[in-house]
């Protein structure tokens, strides 16, 4: 077929009408962005001769994605989350905010309001007996290597099946989710279990999209972090455990060379006793460096709808930083 109508005045005028250009009300930025988005899609339909069958099956797929709240899952799969990180890295570089541990994506599975602790916390509820004991520890420092006491370290990760509490109702509340404030030496320590990698549910709408692209929906074993301290840039990051088949083949594109950490299996009975553990464990060490900033809005995580986080939490988070 050779029908090409996109460039006709009729279609161009129609796009302006649809985008509300003839209306006084509404939001100017929304109009501009919608106009660009619709123009790109109309052109695509023309260029690829998209059939009604293809169009309506896509509408159906979008309905399924939304119905199962999977847009937040497809988003990293299509690289949007990593693309936003690439842009933020470039913005930091341009503003000469250099140094610090690299950021990487938050993902869709954070839940606000995890239990808080000073220096040390046990993160697992003891129910997941197939999980290897993990001893996760590290120091938070500034870019000159000075330890930062009282830094807020939020940690969340999956269980031995790759599932996250809250989203997996079979787990106890806030299992494998904690907020730890660093001690006088800037150190945090967590006793937990080694997480497994995550896989997009088989047959789910996100899986259908990835399959159509010949891709898989697997993530390597990883641990999420939010790390913040007054006077420093908020860090959203993750570590990937080395040796996972997907460490460098992550469907969510979150892996960064500097964030791959090798766990160390420890069987020495003195080391086990020192930590009051029952048997061998795997030690994971992750030190983080925070870049300096005076800008308050860079000291807190960016706004986005999150489970159990409302506007009030966000406001108090900002206020808390401002007071210090
Ligand atoms: C995860 O655990 C995750 O971190 C991301 C980014 C996507 C899906 C599951
Ligand atoms: Fe995750």
Image: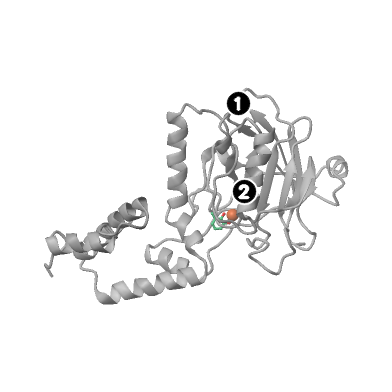
Residue placed at 88% from the left, 44% from the top? 273
Circle 1 SS class: loop
- In the displayed structure image, the side of residue 253 where residue 41 appears, left or right: left
Q: Height in image: 61 above or below 242?
A: below
**What is the CA distance from the residue labelled 1 to the residue labelled 2?**
27 Å
The tag on residue 100 is: none
Residue placed at 55% from the left, 62% from the top? 199
Q: Quadrant of residue 125?
A: bottom right
The picture places residue 187, in percent across and down from the top left corner, at 74, 35
Closer to the eye: label 1 or 2: 2
Ligand 2 falls in quadrant? bottom right
The residue where tag 2 is placed is 314
- Which of 67 and 324 lies nearest the eye of the viewer? 324
- Which of 237 and 26 lies nearest the eye of the viewer? 26
The picture places residue 259, in percent across and down from the top left corner, at 57, 40
Tell me which numbered mark, 1 or 2, is placed earlier along the sequence: 1
Residue placed at 59% from the left, 57% from the top? 109
The residue where tag 1 is placed is 143
The picture places residue 85, in percent across and down from the top left corner, at 47, 43
- In the displayed structure image, the side of residue 56 where residue 180 appears, left or right: right
Circle 2 SS class: helix
- In the displayed structure image, the side of residue 300 where residue 204 appears, left or right: left
Mark 2, other Cα within 10 Å: few <14 / some 14–19 / many ≥20? some
The picture places residue 294, in percent across and down from the top left corner, at 58, 29
């Amino acid at each position: 077929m050779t029908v090409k109508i996109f460039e006709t005045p009729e279609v161009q005028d129609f796009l302006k009408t649809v985008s509300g250009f003839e209306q006084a009300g509404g939001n100017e930025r929304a109009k501009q962005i919608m106009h660009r988005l619709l123009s790109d899609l109309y052109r695509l339909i023309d260029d690829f001769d998209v059939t009604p069958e293809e169009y309506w099956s896509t509408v159906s797929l979008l309905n399924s994605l939304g119905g199962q709240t999977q847009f937040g899952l497809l988003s990293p799969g299509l690289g949007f989350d990593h693309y936003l990180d690439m842009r933020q890295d470039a913005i930091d570089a341009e503003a000469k905010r250099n140094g610090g541990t690299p950021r990487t994506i938050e993902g869709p599975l954070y839940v606000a309001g995890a239990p808080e602790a000073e220096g040390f916390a046990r993160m697992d509820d003891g129910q997941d007996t197939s999980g290897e004991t993990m001893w996760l520890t590290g120091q938070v420092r500034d870019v000159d290597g000075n330890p930062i006491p009282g830094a807020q370290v939020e940690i969340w990760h999956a269980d031995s099946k790759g599932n996250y509490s809250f989203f997996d109702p079979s787990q106890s509340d806030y299992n494998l989710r904690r907020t730890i404030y660093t001690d006088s030496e800037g150190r945090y320590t967590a006793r937990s279990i080694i997480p497994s990698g995550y896989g997009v549910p088989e047959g789910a709408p996100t899986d259908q999209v990835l399959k159509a692209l010949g891709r898989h929906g697997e993530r390597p074993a990883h641990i999420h972090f939010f790390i913040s301290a007054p006077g420093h840039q908020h860090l959203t990051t993750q570590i990937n455990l080395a040796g996972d088949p997907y460490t460098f083949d992550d469907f969510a594109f979150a892996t960064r060379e500097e964030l791959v950490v090798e766990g160390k299996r420890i069987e020495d009975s003195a080391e086990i006793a020192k930590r009051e553990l029952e048997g061998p464990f795997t030690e994971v060490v992750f030190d983080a460096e925070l870049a300096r900033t005076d800008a308050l809005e860079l000291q807190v995580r960016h706004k986005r709808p999150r489970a159990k986080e409302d506007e009030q939490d966000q406001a108090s988070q900002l206020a808390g930083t401002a007071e210090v």
